[in-house]
Image (spheres, helix red, strand yellow):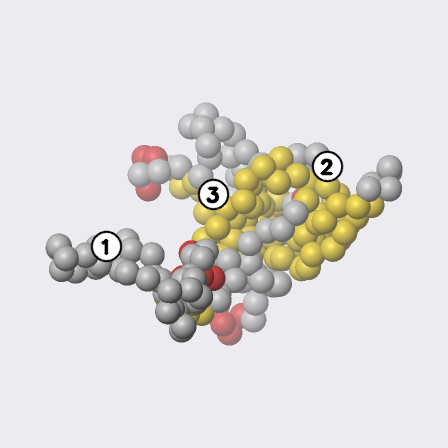
Amino acid sequence: MKFILAKKIEMSQIFDDKGRVHPVTWLLAGPIFVTQKKSAEKDGYVSVQVGFGTKKEKNIKKPQKKLGNFEGFKEFRPLTSDASLPEVGDKIDVSVFKEGDAVNVSGTSKGKGFQGVVKRHGFAGGSRTHGQKHSEREPGSIGATWPQRVLKGKRMPGRMGSERVTVRNLKVIKIIPEKNLLAILGAVPGHRGSLVEVRG
């Protein structure tokens, strides 16, 4: 079970040995420290809680002070019941990954505010013909004679983004252990500085 927390730095590009260019996302990955282990007997499920980053001591809540001076906490559940888990106090850094590993990256997507159906759902909008002068980006009919209401789940304008997104089977292109940097092929969800989870 490979996992780490990382901060998204920026997107860039890397040239390989054959001169081909690859788009990558640079992540500041770890190090993270195991703060707690949860068991099926005591907590009802098995997981590992880790702490990431640091923050001012005056901003730490009292119950969290015993865990350490960490900016944030996350839990990771093992994929199988017999997976070997790290112990409390263990340090996890980018060395758990190797170049060429396939990883899943989860994060919170960029918030785009209130958007219409064309941007939010990819609607084509109305045509300019048949007297439709002002309905290029409108959704069209949203109901029927019966049941005299808008059905639940109807695709309509609304808040877009700020959702948890997981991108699967991304490739680790480059690792710089001394700087805790991880280069992932392609784009990962979130804005610069956002926290993402990398699972192997």
Can you tell which of label 2 and label 1 is closer to the viewer?
1
Q: Which quadrant holds residue 16? A: top right
Can you tell which of label 3 and label 2 is closer to the viewer?
2
Lower position in the chain sequence, tag 1 or tag 3: 3
Where is mark 1, residue-wise?
152
Where is mark 3, residue-wise?
76
Mark-to-mark CA distance, 2 and 1: 46 Å
Mark-to-mark CA distance, 1 and 3: 34 Å
Q: Mark 1: give few (<14), some (14-19) or many (20+) Cα within 10 Å.
A: few
Q: Is residue 185 above or below residue 149?
A: above
On the rendered structure, is 100 left or right of 82?
Answer: right
Tell me the number on the disc at residue 63.
Answer: none
Where is mark 2, residue-wise?
99
**Picture coordinates of residue 167 (x, y %)?**
54, 44
Can you tell which of label 1 and label 3 is closer to the viewer?
1
Question: Mark 2–mark 1 contact, CB under 8 Å?
Answer: no
Q: Residue at 62% of width from left, 44% of height from top?
A: 92
**Helix, strand or loop status at disc 3:** strand
Please state which of residues 112 and 83 is positioned toward the viewer in this rendering: 112
Q: Residue at 55% of width from left, 58% of height from top?
A: 190
